[in-house]
Amino acid sequence: MFEESTTDVSVDPATSEHSPGRTSTEPAPARAPATLTAAGDLLRALAAPVRISIVLQLRESDRCVHELVDALGVAQPLISQHLRVLKSAGVVHGERHGREVVYRLVDEHLSHIVVDAVTHVEEAHN
């Protein structure tokens, strides 16, 4: 299937344009397939503009649905639908306070993933 190339294409990792500052030539440690599947599921749960916006809002403070509706200008049913996805993925947790459910991020690591992605895109467009 794959033909072996006779051309030597070795790259000095210390000067690689794709990974500046990285010098290790060791492969990354192998991860369990279940771990990789769960990580893919988590990234898919975060992969929608409204869900990214929700995470950014919850990074600032806990919010109830109507606060997210007001902040994002998105209809309440759509916010609720996206919150269900984030909740089932373990990204947010809802706690009932009287008639309202207040949502918060389960883990700050998750907001870092989103912030890093947004920052990367903003830097690429500058």
Image (cartoon, rainbow, N blue to C red):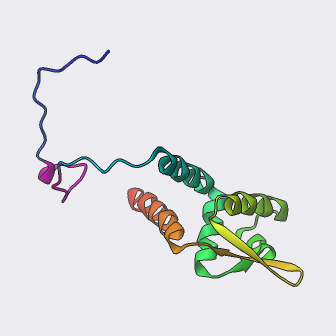
Q: Position of residue 117 (x, y in %)?
A: 47, 60
Identify the residue at image location x=59%, y=57%: 46
In the rendered image, residue 48 lying in the magenta stretch gets the answer: no
Q: Quadrant of residue 101?
A: bottom right
Identify the residue at image location x=79%, y=72%: 65
Q: Quadrant of residue 100?
A: bottom right
Between 62 and 87, the one lying in front of the other is 87
- Please tell me whether residue 9 is drawn above or below residue 85 in the rendered image: above
Identify the residue at image location x=49%, y=51%: 35
- Please tell me whether residue 60 is drawn above or below residue 4 in the rendered image: below
Identify the residue at image location x=67%, y=61%: 86
- Location of the N terminus by quadrant is top left
State left or right for residue 48 relative to residue 73. left
State left or right for residue 48 relative to residue 110. right
Q: Position of residue 38 (x, y in %)?
A: 55, 51
Q: Position of residue 116 (x, y in %)?
A: 44, 64
Q: Position of residue 96 (x, y in %)?
A: 81, 79
- Please tell me whether residue 38 is drawn above or below residue 73 in the rendered image: above
Query: Which residues are drawn in magenta?
Result: 13-24
